[in-house]
Every structure is written in structure tokens, then in C-alpha cells.
Amino acid sequence: MQHIDRDQLYTESEYRFNYVAGFMDFGADDIKAIETVADKIRPLVPVVVDAVYNKLFTYDITKKHFLPKNEGFEGKTATSLEDLTLDHPQIKFRKDFLSKYLNKLLSGPYDDRMLRYLDWVAKIHTDTPEKKSKINVDYIHINALMGYVETTLIGGILSLKLPEDQLAAALSAFNKLLWIQNDYFAKYYCNPEATVQKRESPCQQLLSLPTAVGALVGAFAAWIAFKNKKL
């Protein structure tokens, strides 16, 4: 039986990744599966990005997070939800960020720099002292978004008509990868110092469950999509 130090899970990012990745059986075969289909998936990135932002603009509670000035954006921001359109310069800036993120996942390499990048992507969506912007997105929206990104990506992968072995490997690999990213998000929605106390906070109790079972649920959804494709 492997021993896992609970305190280290919340104080050492690499230790946390190794645990979650190991729990999900994410490894060299998954990275190879991503590399194998990356060139075929890359042209789908703009379609995925547009679909994601169309969804985010469907609800006022998610759209409002794009009104504050984004860190790194030098242009003029919209003053109301009505003025904020999908072709607004700040939304184009955010779309470019999402495109770069998806292409980074496709290109790798999956080394320490990638782990720091996945951690940074999660961190900038929360209100931390190191940030210049004050964008702070509630976890419920992040969780829903990650589910939608995975569903959209699965649809894109299925449209490629890949050989069955490549398709199954790609669906499994991206499912695991996106749940690993989701865990990085979850990490920032509880006070790390509170989690090393003997008594878990209610927040920590809630966040540990979706991380543990999320890969299983996502894998089941990917399997259903794969089986439906064969029928």
C-alpha cells in the first residue's frame, strides 16, 4: 500500500499532481495518445473556442466575469453586459488565451513547466494577492465549464473518424488531462493552510469528491460516446 502524506497534497504542487495523475492512471501512454492525434485536433481549436464563449455568453452570471479588465489586456473594457459582445477586443483577447491554452495541451511537453502552467491557469481565475486583476470565478462555473469543454472536445474528436484504437486512447487521455486541470482549479477554492488541520473544512470535503470520481464519470461518458459511434 502506498502512503500519501495529506499535508503535502496541499503544500507541494508536484506531489499533488503525482498523486492525482497516479490515481487516474495518467501516464506515458496517455501523453503518446495526445501527441498522436494532436495535429488532427489542432484545426478544431477555433471551433471549440467559439463554442465555449457562445456558452459562456448564454448566462449573465458567467458573462459578467468578462467585464473586469483582464490582466495583460491594454484596451478599453465594456461598461455593461449589453455592450460586451463576442467580437469585443477584450473577448478576442480572452479567446486568444483559450486558444493558446488548448494548443499548449496538444503540444506539450508534459514536464515541470507544464505543471506550473496548469497551476497558473487555475490560479489566475481566483482572487489571489499576486494578481493585478480581481477576476474571481466561483467554482460552480469553472466545474461546469470544464465539463462543457470536455463534451465539446469529445464531439470534435469523434468527428475525425480516427481508427478505433487511436480514438479510444485519445478519449481516455483527454478525459484524464481535463480532470487533472480541474483538480488544479479545485486547489485554489479552499485555503491551503486550513486543509492541513486535523478537521477538514466543509469546502475541502466537497472538493475532494468530484476530483476523485470525476475521471470515472468522464471516462464513462467518453466510453458511451465511443460505443455510440460504433453502433
Image: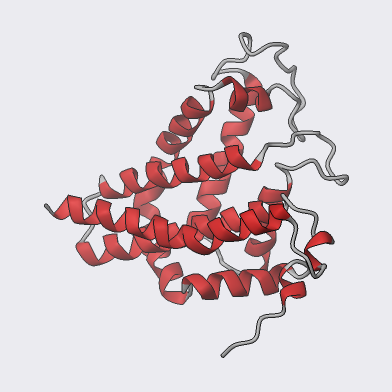
- Pick out the residue farthest to the bottom: 1
38 relative to 42, above or below? below
Please state, as top left, top right, bottom left or bottom right, where the N terminus lies in the image: bottom right
Residue 180 x, y percent position in the rendering: 55, 60
80 relative to 99, above or below? above
- Pick out the residue farthest to the left: 231
Can I make out residue 209 in this image? yes
Q: Residue at x 69, y 57 (%)?
A: 204
- Would you say 19 lies left or right of 133 here? left
Q: Residue at x 78, y 65 (%)?
A: 199
Depth order, front residue of 171/109: 171
Residue 69 x, y percent position in the rendering: 76, 26
Residue 29 x, y percent position in the rendering: 41, 74
85 relative to 65, above or below? above
- Would you say 99 lies left or right of 163 here? right
Can I make out residue 118 in this image? no
Q: Residue at x 33, y 55 (%)?
A: 222
Depth order, front residue of 187/157: 187
Residue 133 picture quarter: top right
182 relative to 12, above or below? above
- Would you say 4 lies left or right of 75 here? left
> Colour mode?
secondary structure
- Pick out the residue farthest to the top: 82
- Would you say 70 lies left or right of 208 here? right
Q: Residue at x 74, y 43 (%)?
A: 126
Q: State the count of labels.
A: 0
